[in-house]
């Protein structure tokens, strides 16, 4: 029992500086640690878009935070299976081994997927496994259900878990989730979601401690970029009681729901979407390096059959899936993932947790009334293609195709705004990553120089110490894996060692590597902390500057600010974003009495305090410039 309780605290893990992990996974884990240390009782909410690495965040969350067992709750079997596969420590492809978080296989967590039991003997065996496990994964129906007495709340005591992690947390306002949290006494609750909103407007409960926006995921190239095409017909007429009327007349006589559903069920309107989605599919397959596929969404089963038949008319292999034909749907999904099917038409089935990177076209044949289901459907096409040498400007673009009269424009606007935001943030990030120009202040003396010039250039907010260090560790791990494979091959062929002997040899080698790397991590901890502070400081600046340009409606590529200053240093700025960068850098350097490369931990804290006032001064300057131009 003590081993289970102390596992997450005592296990040696490689997270800060681990370049095998995504930056957002390292950052989210850091926030989880800090937030639970400061406030252990408030529920913590983490917002990550589809494809950004949410399963990895779940895998890292308990370490150095949890003092006992962890329960991971999913809303569906598909999501449970996806997490279970990533957490399967029986293979070398589990998340912790694959991403070098845990090098010694003997220190991997014990993971159990709870799926219920049938007989008393089953229950006895399962209870033993549950007692010995570190992480339990279950879908909500196996955790709490009024229709069963074999759920986890029926067989486990309230204090069994120290941490509960809820995936797709926008479901957790429902009664079954609330009853679960009421029963178990776990104080550490983490909720993860890509859509921190619900159609019924119920509060998720808790504090958002980390929010990695869709815009950032697009900017950083973690997910596919998005392109939308709305299609319409030149003349649209509706038939009411045998009369043909225009759209405007139909809206007056019926309502918007009637109009959009009529469009959805119209074979001619559906055909336009089918034809355009096929054109895009053929173009992407011809020009790209990936086998692209279409996911479609229909109103009903009969509607899905109609759409499937429309695709078939054009020689496109299509199938439909729905919850009322489970076995056939599972076969279709397998064939689709194998590439034997080009289009899969979905009726309320392939939502959260269905991950297939080759989906690059989302064809919408039904109206959506709220953002959550719309966002979940679009999310199926966002996962980035990373194999077969993809061309990002072709293979990693997700196309959304829909009929204009389905009234989806407002929902698309959410994504459109995120894309604009991503482009604006990328430009600002590039500007703030430029090499800082050397400039001369008026309050310094003359310096006489002799001898040859020695150049040592530092980029803004990036001294690279920890980056080089983490790369060195990555290189050492890669070299170790290659050498270990060679040695094992020799031991098998030359010494004819048994599998058990080779397994013992491998464990000893991995333990020695873990000890060696752990020593290096502790020695350079200060450098890792400093680099993380630099990254967070840069993110803070980019966030504030992006909001500044958005709120003031000032074009970042304009020249209003440098054209209206008498400061020689700022006057030479090529555009507004360069002016803002120079202004911020200059003020911070003067305030803290030294450049970024000399900052200590407390300097970053002081800079964070000073930034709001600096941004306010720039905003005042922008308002003055705009008033003068009026």
Image (cartoon, rainbow, N blue to C red):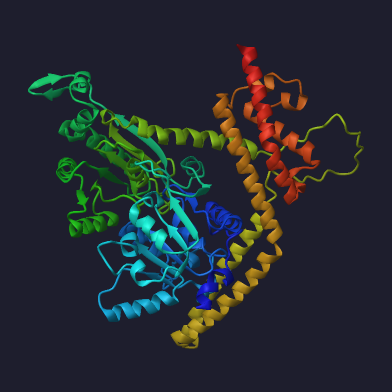
- Residue found at the very far top of the displayed protein: 630
Q: What is the quadrant of residue 623 in the picture? A: top right
In the picture provided, is 517 more to the left or to the right than 134? right
Does any portion of residue 485 appear in the rendered image? no
Q: Nearer the viewer, residue 30 or 346?
A: 30
Snapshot quadrant of residue 10: bottom right
Provide residue 369's location: percent of width, then percent of height: 30, 36
* Count of numbered badges drawn on the protein: 0
Pick the quarter of the image with the C terminus. Answer: top right
Furthest residue toward left: 242
Q: Position of residue 49 (x, y in %)?
A: 44, 47
Quadrant for residue 591, please give it.
top right
Seen at 46% across and 86% down, the residue is 500
Left or right, 456 with reference to 546: right
Residue at 35%, 61% (x, y): give it.
Answer: 80
- Image position, residue 407 (x, y; %): 29, 30
**Residue drawn at the location 68% of the way across and 44% of the way down:** 461
Residue 254, x across and y down, in percent: 18, 25
Q: Is any part of residue 251 visible from this angle?
A: yes
Residue 129 versus residue 47 in the image, above or below: below
* Residue at x 60%, y 63% (from the top left corner): 475
């Amino acid at each position: 029992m003590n081993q289970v309780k102390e596992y997450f605290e005592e296990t040696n893990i490689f997270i800060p500086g681990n370049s095998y992990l995504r930056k957002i996974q390292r950052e989210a884990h850091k926030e989880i640690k800090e937030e639970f240390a400061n406030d252990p009782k408030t529920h913590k909410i983490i917002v990550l878009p589809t494809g950004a690495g949410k399963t990895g965040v779940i895998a890292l969350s308990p370490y150095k935070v949890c003092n006992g067992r962890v329960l991971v709750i999913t809303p569906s079997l598909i999501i449970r299976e996806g997490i279970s596969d990533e957490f399967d420590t029986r293979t070398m492809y589990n998340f912790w081994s694959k991403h070098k978080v845990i090098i010694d296989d003997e220190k991997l967590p014990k993971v159990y997927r709870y799926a219920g039991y049938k007989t008393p003997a089953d229950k006895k065996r399962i209870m033993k496994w549950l007692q010995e496990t570190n992480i339990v994964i279950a879908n909500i129906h196996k955790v709490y259900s009024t229709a069963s007495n074999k759920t986890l709340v029926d067989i486990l005591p309230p204090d069994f878990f120290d941490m509960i992690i809820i995936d797709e947390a926008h479901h957790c306002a429902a009664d079954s989730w609330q009853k679960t949290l009421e029963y178990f006494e776990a104080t550490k609750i983490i909720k993860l979601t890509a859509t921190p909103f619900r159609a019924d407007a119920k509060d998720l409960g808790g504090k958002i401690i980390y929010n990695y926006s869709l815009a950032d995921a697009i900017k950083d190239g973690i997910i596919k970029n998005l392109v939308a095409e709305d299609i319409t017909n030149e003349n649209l007429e509706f038939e009411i009681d045998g009369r043909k009327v225009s759209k405007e007349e139909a809206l007056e006589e019926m309502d918007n729901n009637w109009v959009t559903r009529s469009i959805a069920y119209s074979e001619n309107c559906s055909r336009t979407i089918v034809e355009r989605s096929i054109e895009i599919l053929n173009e992407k397959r011809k020009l790209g390096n990936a086998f692209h596929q279409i996911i479609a969404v229909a109103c009903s089963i009969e509607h899905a059959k109609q759409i499937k038949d429309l695709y078939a008319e054009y020689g496109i292999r299509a199938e439909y899936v729905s919850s009322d034909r489970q076995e056939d749907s599972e076969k279709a999904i397998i064939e689709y993932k194998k590439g034997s099917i080009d289009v899969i038409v979905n009726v309320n089935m392939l939502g959260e947790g269905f991950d297939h990177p080759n989906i690059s076209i989302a064809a919408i044949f039904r109206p959506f009334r709220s953002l959550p289901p719309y966002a979940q459907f679009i999310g199926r096409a966002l996962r980035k293609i990373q194999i077969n040498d993809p061309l990002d400007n072709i293979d990693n673009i997700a196309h959304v195709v829909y009929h204009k009269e389905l009234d989806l424009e407002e929902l698309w606007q959410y994504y459109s705004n995120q894309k604009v935001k991503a482009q604006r943030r990328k430009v600002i990030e590039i500007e703030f990553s430029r090499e800082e120009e050397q400039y001369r202040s008026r309050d310094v003396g003359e310096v006489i120089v002799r001898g040859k010039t020695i150049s040592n250039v530092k980029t803004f907010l990036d001294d690279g110490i920890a980056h080089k260090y983490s790369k060195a560790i990555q290189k050492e791990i890669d070299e170790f894996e290659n050498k270990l494979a060679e040695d094992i091959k020799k031991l098998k062929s030359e010494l004819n060692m048994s599998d058990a002997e080779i397994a013992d040899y491998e464990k000893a080698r991995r333990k020695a590597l873990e000890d060696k790397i752990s020593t290096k991590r502790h020695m350079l901890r200060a450098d890792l902390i400093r680099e993380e502070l630099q990254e967070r400081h840069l993110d803070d600046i980019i966030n504030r500057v992006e909001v500044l340009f958005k709120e003031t409606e000032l074009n970042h590529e304009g020249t209003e600010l440098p054209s209206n200053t008498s400061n020689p240093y700022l006057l030479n700025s090529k555009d507004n974003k360069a002016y803002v960068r120079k202004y911020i850098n200059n003020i911070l350097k003067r305030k803290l009495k030294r450049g970024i490369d000399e900052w200590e931990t407390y300097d970053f804290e002081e800079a964070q305090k000073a930034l709001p006032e600096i941004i306010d001064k720039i905003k005042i300057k922008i308002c003055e410039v705009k008033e003068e131009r009026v």
